[in-house]
Amino acid sequence: MSETEYRQKIAAFLAQAQENAEIIFSVDPEERRKNRDFLLKFNIKERDRISIIKELTVDDFCEEILERVKDKTIFGNLYVFKKDKELQERQTNDKRLVHIYIKLQVLTTDDGKATFVVSFHEAEKQMKLFFKTR
């Protein structure tokens, strides 16, 4: 697949993820604590998370993780994005630029398609943007 075709694939995924009426945030215990601590640290509400997801662009894309498997069940591909946002820490009121690690998946539900947010927390390591490093 050419870079142009791959960019179009990611753009189509992102459009679907952003258009879905339902956005579900992970309750996985492994991810939940990290996500929750981040949200509390910066006082990020659900509407803020949804807004940040809707602001994502193809240029924020980092990687595609093929076939997420949990407990021997295949859930499909995951898409990782990095969004830089200036956020204010709750305790100190200090504002700083934060690199947010966002891992998304589009799932088919009984009501149609839903966006499943697997991860939403501060990046723990340097993230490379896929299309800006080419």
Image: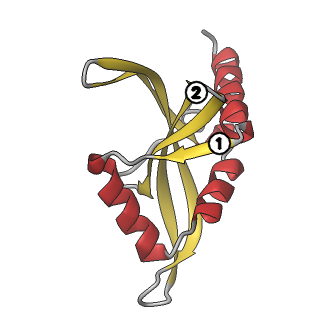
Q: In screen coordinates, is 4 left or right of 104? A: right
Q: Residues within 10 Å of mark 2 (few under 14, many from 20)?
A: few
Instruction: Name the foreground residue: 28 vs 39.
Output: 28
| Of callouts 2 and 1, the N-terminal one | 1
**Quadrant containing the N terminus in the rendered view:** top right
**Quadrant containing the C terminus in the rendered view:** top right
Q: Which residue is mark 1?
A: 22
**Image quadrant where residue 7 sits:** top right
**Visible residue check, residue 45:** yes
Residue 63 in picture, x, y percent from top left: 48, 32
Q: Residues within 10 Å of mark 1 (few under 14, many from 20)?
A: some
Q: Amino acid at mark 2?
A: Thr
The numbered mark at residue 31 is none
Q: In screen coordinates, is 4 left or right of 66? A: right
User: Residue drawn 39% across and 63% down?
Assistant: 36
The answer to whether the residues at label 2 and label 1 have Cβ atoms under 8 Å apart is: yes
Q: Which residue is mark 2?
A: 109
Q: In screen coordinates, is 33 left or right of 89? A: left
User: Residue drawn 60% across and 25% down?
Assistant: 110
Q: Amino acid at mark 1?
A: Glu
Residue 17 in picture, x, y percent from top left: 65, 36
